[in-house]
Image (tube, rainbow, N blue to C red):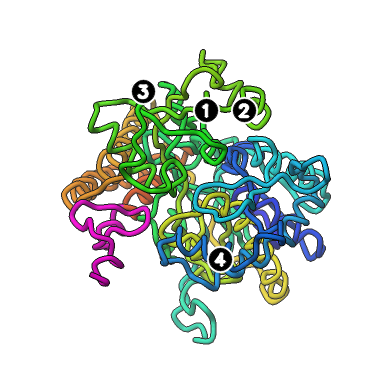
């Protein structure tokens, strides 16, 4: 089947849904949103902490937020991108509220602001400890009720449709590649052709390429992989943020339950299972140090002592206050026999957020003409070498706004490419091939966690490269002869993303931000300045 839409949105979450609502408001064409599973299964739903925005002007201002972001990003962040997000954040918070999002307030009606690691002021708007779920709820209600937005659940984008035009005028951003839509696998197992004037990629993160992640199992880096295969620019993939405190509960790995950074901001103290503190050996900010420092510290302590986890202790805090601020974490831990008001929480690092991705400009345009990228799958330049806590949700909605404005201004100039061939649906998929795919997925996770994790080395990265290369050859040969299924397509994407993370980690000959290698342990800035 061939479908035609003015706006094709691949993915959902805060990025895709806010973009859909913004372009729908203009009534300039048909809008389709492709959801890999259901509309509610997105990384947004798992974001506990909140949304960063300068709100309390009595003590906070844009320059403070900008500086905090630049410091956290290890001065790799693009200052123009940082300024765009920070200065446009308050307006986008108002828009989220207009769509029905509820942020917690104090008795006097002002927002109950939290402070998280790396922030110099209290500027985190939140909804208890399930902010992402609240935003997801509000946006889903708004999207589902809009007559101009068509939602295709349980549909999987296999490839974007592109064509190289070496003769295109050089005034275009990308004189050789243009996007015309995507090939999409439907629930019946057939691949349909979706033609579009404008395509938005908002497929979320790629944490599922690691053995343990706070991301849902669907976070296989599909957007980054599709754009990479189409010869688009993918950047900064070496900067994988590991959340230092996921709940250690064997069996729950995709997603591992997240213990929000706000709990350390609240006064939680990191300790060994013996009760001994250790962060004083790594950073003067102790448990409130940035995530990369805390994650490396925990990783080192676990390896040094042969531990499966460390602990986060809030037993010294008022029990009722703890239950009030973190009701979901309290109930989750209680469900596995841990009363966090009386017992320490077992935690360990888990792959959490990709700071790199599909390279875009200030309008959300990728290097491929007519293709935009927003949210975690994109690389705006905001995060640089390390994401500042709670900057990601606001980045998604600010860039969705920028992409919506730009795409609305040009969509009438585009037409559908009806010469695009349909997908070849030949091939079969046997149980034997399914077993091979399952084992290969497991192997990707082992390779990435063992060799391209929190601490790296040239030798480990080379070993990952060699093993991923073998998996790539095997999987591509399999893909050419079997019927396209979500399993084989996800495996291809995971291998492509693993390769990108590994290759770009090999290319960065320094320890910077989230990329730490024992072969280049001295920070580049420190080395330069003696």
Label 4 sits on residue: 66
With 44 as the anchor, is 217 left or right in this view? left
Q: Do the residues labelled 4 and 3 touch (CB within 8 Å)?
A: no
Find numbered disc 2 in the image and state the secondary structure of the residue it sits on. helix
Mark 2 vs 4, N-terminal side = 4
Q: Do the residues labelled 1 and 2 touch (CB within 8 Å)?
A: yes
Q: Main secondary structure of the magenta part?
A: loop
Q: Distance between the residues labelled 2 and 4?
A: 31 Å
Task: Determine which of the numbered discs, if any, sits on residue 322 in the image.
Answer: 2
**Could you tell me which residue is drawn at 66 percent across and 28 percent down?**
321
Label 1 sits on residue: 314
Q: Distance between the residues labelled 4 and 1?
A: 31 Å
Mark 4 vs 1, N-terminal side = 4
Residue 439, how many percent across, how many down? 32, 30
Q: Foreground mark, 4 or 1? A: 1
Q: How far apart are marks 3 and 1 (CA)?
A: 14 Å
Depth check, front residue: 93 or 3? 93
Label 3 sits on residue: 273
Residue 23, how many percent across, how many down? 75, 61
Q: How far apart are marks 3 and 2 (CA)?
A: 21 Å
Q: Is residue 308 magenta?
A: no
With 191 as the anchor, is 492 left or right in this view? left
Q: How far apart are marks 1 and 2 (CA)?
A: 8 Å
Residue 410, how many percent across, how many down? 69, 75
**Quick check: can you spot residue 243?**
yes
Would you call the spot at circle 3 few (<14 residues within 10 Å), some (14-19), or many (20 or more)?
some
**Could you tell me which residue is drawn at 71 percent across and 69 percent down?**
405
């Amino acid at each position: 089947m061939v479908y035609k839409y003015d706006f094709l949105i691949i993915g959902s979450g805060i990025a895709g849904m806010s973009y859909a609502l913004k372009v729908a408001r203009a009534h300039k064409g048909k809008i389709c949103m492709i959801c890999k599973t259901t509309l509610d299964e997105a990384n947004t739903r798992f974001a506990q902490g909140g949304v960063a925005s300068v709100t309390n002007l009595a003590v906070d201002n844009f320059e403070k937020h900008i500086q905090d972001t630049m410091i956290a990003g290890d001065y790799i962040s693009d200052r123009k991108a940082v300024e765009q997000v920070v200065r446009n954040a308050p307006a986008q918070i108002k828009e989220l509220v207009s769509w029905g999002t509820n942020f917690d307030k104090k008795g006097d009606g002002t927002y109950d602001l939290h402070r998280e690691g790396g922030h110099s002021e209290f500027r985190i708007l939140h909804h208890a400890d399930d902010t992402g779920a609240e935003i997801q709820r509000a946006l889903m209600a708004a999207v589902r009720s809009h007559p101009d937005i068509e939602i295709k659940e349980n549909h999987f984008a296999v490839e974007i449709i592109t064509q190289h035009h070496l003769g295109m005028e050089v005034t275009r951003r990308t004189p050789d590649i243009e996007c015309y839509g995507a090939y999409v696998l439907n629930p019946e197992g057939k691949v349909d052709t979706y033609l579009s004037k404008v395509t938005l990629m908002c497929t979320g993160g790629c944490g599922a390429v690691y053995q343990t992640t706070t991301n849902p199992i669907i976070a296989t880096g599909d957007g980054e992989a599709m754009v990479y295969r189409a010869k688009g620019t993918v950047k900064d993939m070496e900067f994988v943020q590991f959340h230092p405190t996921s709940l250690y509960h064997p069996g729950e790995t995709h997603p591992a339950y997240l213990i929000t950074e706000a709990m350390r901001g609240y006064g939680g103290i990191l300790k060994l299972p013996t009760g001994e503190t250790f962060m004083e050996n790594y950073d003067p900010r102790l448990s409130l140090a940035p995530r990369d420092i805390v994650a490396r510290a925990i990783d080192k302590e676990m390896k040094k002592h042969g531990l499966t986890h460390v602990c986060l202790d809030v037993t010294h805090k008022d029990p009722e206050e703890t239950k009030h601020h973190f009701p979901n974490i309290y109930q989750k831990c209680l469900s596995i026999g841990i009363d966090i008001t009386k017992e320490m929480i077992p935690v360990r690092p888990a792959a959490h957020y990709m700071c790199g991705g599909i390279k875009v400009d200030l309008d959300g345009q990728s290097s491929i003409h007519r293709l935009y990228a927003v949210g975690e799958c994109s690389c705006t330049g905001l995060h640089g070498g390390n994401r500042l806590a709670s900057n990601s949700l606001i980045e998604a909605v600010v860039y969705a706004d920028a992409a919506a404005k730009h795409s609305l201004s040009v969509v009438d100039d585009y037409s559908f490419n009806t010469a695009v061939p349909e997908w070849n649906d030949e091939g079969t998929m046997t149980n034997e091939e399914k077993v091979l795919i399952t084992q290969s997925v497991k192997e990707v996770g082992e390779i990435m966690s063992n060799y391209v994790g929190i601490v790296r080395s040239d030798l480990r990265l080379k070993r990952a490269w060699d093993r991923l290369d073998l998996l790539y050859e095997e999987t591509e040969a399999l893909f050419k002869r079997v019927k396209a299924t979500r399993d084989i397509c996800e495996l291809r994407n995971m291998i492509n993303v693993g390769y990108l993370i590994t290759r770009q980690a090999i290319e960065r000959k320094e320890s910077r931000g989230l990329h730490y290698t024992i072969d280049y342990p001295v920070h580049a800035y420190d080395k330069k300045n003696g």
